Image (cartoon, rainbow, N blue to C red):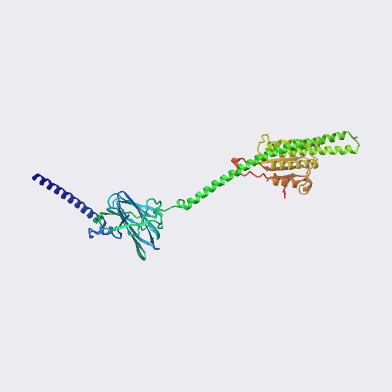
Amino acid sequence: MQLRKVHRLRQILLAAAVAASAFAGLDFFLSTRVLADEPATASPNAWLHEATNHVGSWIWETNTFDKQAVHLWKVFEIPAGKITAATLRITVDNGYTLFLDGQELGRGSDWRTVTEYNLAQFLKPGRHIIAVDGFNDRLEGGLIFGLYVELAGAPPVEIDSDESWFIAPLEIKNWTLRKYLPVGWHHALVLGPPHHNPWQDWPLGLASVPPLKPVVLHFWQRGWFQITLSVVCAGAVLFCLWLLTQLAAQTKAQKFLQVERARIARDIHDDLGAQLTQLLLLGEVAQREHPEASTARGQFTQLCAGARALAHTLDEIVWAVNSRRDTVRDFTSYVCKYAQIFLDPTGIRCRLDVEAEMPATAFDLPLRRNLFLAVKEALNNAAKYSQAQELFLRIFRRGQKLLVVVEDNGVGFDPEQASGERNGLTNMAQRMAEIGGTCALASQPGAGCRVTFAVPLPVPRRGWFRRAAQPTPAPGEIEISGS
């Protein structure tokens, strides 16, 4: 019996020692807080009064249970004016995450401590949303909140935790951004004033957060810029796809055109050429059946000569239409052969000066057709009017230009007094103008004549951005206009 009393006395003394130690620690914490935050003359409980100043009541969901998450939401307005001070105090039993207009401001996990936020530089006049994601670990749960905004020249705005707060369903997404009350949300339940049971010994401390500043977004971080950039990129991709489609269609059409041109050239050569040859043979047979002095024989001779000229013209058409001859090399070879055959009956000696390595670069139909007809006209003029013994045909490249020079050693003429219709100068200049080329003439009485044709060559892909140098007339040359 005596031992039992001694044991019970020892338990009482141990409990008294633990209580004394706790009160001593609390007294030291309070005295430290007073020394740190208040003047020496302030009351020891002054900071405690400040921590609970401008806060509302404890609020929560209508039912409470352990491990409970609650979404508390409130909308408020700040009138226009300059904000001089804005203090927010909050705590949640047991923890919280605080949002203002969808942006997280802070978190807390010790409900015994009031957290103070300075929002003077963060808040702006207008409509705002306060959202608190609260969590109750066990037993009672509650939120206590207070926002005090001071305005220059206007009454302060005070937002407290009360029955005007709403509970957002947990399954709702983006609930922290809702600026208007959705249907189906219910009011929060007011549990009691700040020191209501079981929070009568609250708070034990006040923690201050450094002043919050609004996040500065650069223009490239803003939604409108990102949306615009996305639209521009999407438009560029669509435009590239459209260009690829057009290119594919153009390539297909070009291949089809080449096939058709080859077919037309083959049909002209095989069909019209054969019929024209048959007519020529029949004319020659009829020519031989008549006496040489007869009128009919002379007519058949003219008919055969016209048929031969028509056959040569038909060969030129076949060469121009045939897509297999669309190269600079083939053009050079054909023009040289044509000049030799054309000048052979005239007695004018044809000398060729051609670049040795002429490329097989594509030379489209409009280019080679107009250039050939212009060269043909220059050869025809030399044969008719020059009275020359020699004619030089020079073909070479200069930069991205193909130059064809027809030069004779004939009697020459004065270009200022020459008739454009007689010499075909206007026609040659017009043909060159149609394909972006030039025609330059140099001649003097007794010094022969030189005609220079220059046409653009296709630009290689790697040099597409470089503009070909325009050939300038040599001294003594004049550029002929096609207008």
Specify whether 59 is left or right of 181: left
Residue 238, horizontal then vertical, whole percent: 55, 46
Give the quarter of the image for residue 73.
bottom left
286 w.r.t. 135: above or below: above
Q: Quadrant of the N terminus?
A: top left
Q: Across the whole image, how many numbered discs are drawn on residues?
A: 0
258 w.r.t. 31: above or below: above
Residue 263, horizontal then vertical, whole percent: 71, 37
Residue 232, horizontal then vertical, whole percent: 52, 49
Specify whether 97 is left or right of 360: left
Of residues 380 and 54, the one nearer the viewer is: 54
Q: Please name the residue shown 63% across and 40% down the image.
A: 252
Asked if residue 83 can be seen in this view, the reply is: yes
Specify whether 178 is left or right of 320: left
Give the quarter of the image for residue 411.
top right
Q: Please name the residue shown 16% across and 49% down the image.
A: 15
Of residues 219 and 332, the one nearer the viewer is: 219
Specify whether 8 is left or right of 390: left
Of residues 463 and 474, the one nearer the viewer is: 463
Residue 101, horizontal then vertical, whole percent: 39, 55
- Name the residue furthest left: 2
Of residues 355 and 127, the one nearer the viewer is: 127
Asked if residue 391 can be seen in this view, the reply is: no
